[in-house]
Image: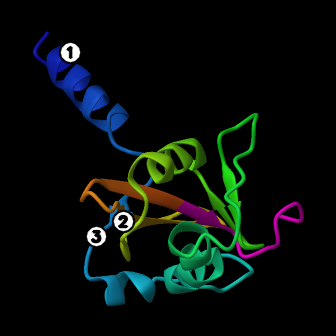
Amino acid sequence: MRFLPALLVALVAAGCKPATETLRGLPTELSAIRSTGERAFSAGDVVTWAQLDDHFRDRTAKLEVGQADGKALLGRLVVLENGDEAADFLKAHGCAQISGPTGVRKLSTALEVEVELVGKDGQKLILILKSDGTPQGEG
């Protein structure tokens, strides 16, 4: 009977573990993390491809959120996973600063890169950028 509680604790601990680990560190260290799979690219490439200044600071590129899934296209190679939140944040707080990457998750053929957006009033939002290195609609 002692074995059953230990087994339950082990199963709960294993089941609560995130599917992918978010790597943390300095932006320069995180930028160097590379994808696995056919296409070799780095977290720094994802941030560059996202053209964040154009979408969030200069506002020269329009942020269009997908109506069905809440995702927005940034550049040709990156999807903003929390597009609805980002659009609402921009309307309410504007954008004073973009920094990061602050976190990176390595997926099987893609990278998810976290970047921090700071509003003009000091409010913060974590942007989740995702790319598999292919142009949208082709990956």
x and y percentages locating residue 28 in the rendered image: 34, 90
Residue 4 — which label?
Answer: 1
Badge 1 local density, few (<14 within 10 Å), some, or many (20+)? few
Which comes before the other along the chain, label 3 or label 2?
3
Secondary structure state at the residue bearing disc 1: helix
**88 is higher (above) or lower (below) than 12:** below
Amino acid type of disc 2? Glu
Residue 96 — which label?
Answer: none
Instruction: Pick the quarter of the image with the C terminus.
Output: bottom right
Viewer-nearest of labels 3 and 1?
Answer: 3
x and y percentages locating residue 98 in the rendered image: 40, 73
Q: Which residue is mark 2?
A: 116
Secondary structure state at the residue bearing disc 2: strand
Amino acid type of disc 1? Leu
Q: Could you tell me how far apart the alpha carbons at marks 3 and 1 are, in whole angstroms? A: 36 Å
Q: Could you tell me how far apart the alpha carbons at marks 3 and 2 are, in whole angstroms? A: 13 Å
Q: Which residues are magenta?
A: 129-139
